[in-house]
Amino acid sequence: MINKSEAVASLRPEVEWTMYGDDVENITWHTEGVTPLTEAEVAAEVVRLEADADAAVVESAALRASAEAKLSALGLSVEEISTIIP
């Protein structure tokens, strides 16, 4: 689960800031000239980052299944494959 701090860091990389609790409206920006974020911007970034994480899990599972199928096609047993791909 992505939290608001991760979303803020994603939206404002290389910017120093402090957030107490989960209150986006009261972020203290330690870097000059930073445009403050709204709660809506942070919430949207949380959704985007969670979708990216979910997609990465699906992609990883698909790659694993593809690798297992290729190894099986080469004649490796399930036991042999499990030693290569734990």
Image (cartoon, helix red, strand yellow):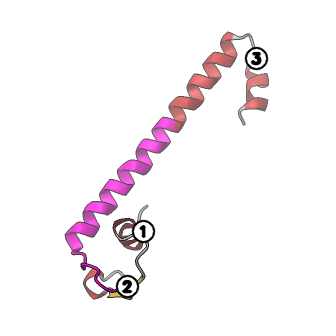
Answer with mark 1 or mark 3, whichever residue precedes in sequence.
1
Amino acid type at image mark 1: Glu
Identify the residue at image location x=73%, y=21%.
Answer: 78
Q: Residues within 10 Å of mark 1 (few under 14, many from 20)?
A: some
Question: What's under tag 2, amino acid-wise?
Answer: Thr
In this view, 31 is above or below 71: below
Query: Which image quadrant is residue 10 in?
Result: bottom left
Question: In this rendering, would 40 be left or right of 75?
Answer: left
What secondary structure is marked by label 1? helix
- Relative height, residue 45 to residue 39 (above, below): above
Quarter of image, res 38? bottom left
Labelled disc at residue 77: 3
Is 49 part of what is drawn in magenta? yes
Instruction: Locate the C terminus and report the quarter of the image it occupies.
Output: top right
- Which residue is denoted by mark 1 in the rendering? 6
- Secondary element type, mark 3: loop
Crowding at mark 2 (Cα within 10 Å: few <14, some 14-19, many 20+): few
Q: Which residue is mark 2?
A: 31
Tell me residue 73's x, y (percent): 66, 10
Q: What residue span does the magenta drawing correspond to?
A: 32-59
